[in-house]
Amino acid sequence: MGFNSKKNQIMKNKNRPLSPHLQIYKPQITSILSISHRFTGVILYLSTFLVSLWLFCTAFNSNLKIILNNFLFSHLGQVVLFFISLSFTYHLLNGLRHIIWDFGYGFNIKNVYLTGFVIIFLTLTINIYIWFF
């Protein structure tokens, strides 16, 4: 009991956190790709509302469909669609990488980093090809 209180006092005197915090944590590709996978999943979840709205408008309300199409073909709409396709491509490719991991392959650190960079490269390449060619 006396040792722990003495240790806590030393830690307080050194003015440093008891556990790693974001200010001192150096981001790694593994953590960035993991967070990005979750983030793109949220974007895809939210974009299903846009797709559902578009399908509903196509089936039932032609006036609303014209308004929605005007938005989607505007510059802002094109940016939204670009990020949705970027999210879809990244989430798909990174999901395939996770499936490969589920089979027990590619766990050594060299392969983890290599496949991470390949996923980023392929995501950008595929989306540039889709949108500009």
Image (cartoon, helix red, strand yellow):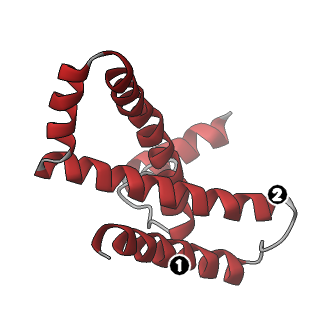
Residue 22 appears at what percent x and percent y?
Answer: 40, 53
Sequence-wise, the earlier of marks 1 and 2 is: 2
Residue 100: image x %, image y %? 78, 65
- Is 30 drawn above or below residue 22 in the view shown? below
Up-down: is 99 above or below 73?
A: below
User: What residue do we see at 87% from left, 62% from top?
Assistant: 103
Res. 127 mark:
none
- Secondary structure beneath disc 1? helix
Answer whether residue 20 is visible to the viewer in this image: no
Please state, as top left, top right, bottom left or bottom right, where the N terminus lies in the image: top right
Q: Quadrant of residue 77?
A: top left
Q: Secondary structure at mark 2?
A: helix
- Please state if 69 lies on the left or on the right of 54 as rendered: left
From the viewer's perspective, is residue 113 above or below residue 2?
A: below
Q: Answer whether residue 114 is visible to the viewer in this image.
A: yes
Q: How many marks?
A: 2
The amino acid beneath tag 1 is Phe
Answer above or below: position of 72 versus 90: above
Residue to which mark 1 is pinned: 117
Would you identify the image quadrant in which residue 25 lies? Answer: bottom left
Residue pointed to by mark 2: 102
Residue at 44% x, 32% y is: 48
- Crowd class of label 2 (few under 14; some 14 to 19; many from 20; radius 10 Å): few
Left or right side of 43 for 110: right
Residue projecting furthest to the top: 60
| Type of amino acid under label 2 | Asp
Residue in the image at 51% along x and 43% along y? 41
The C terminus, quarter of image: bottom left
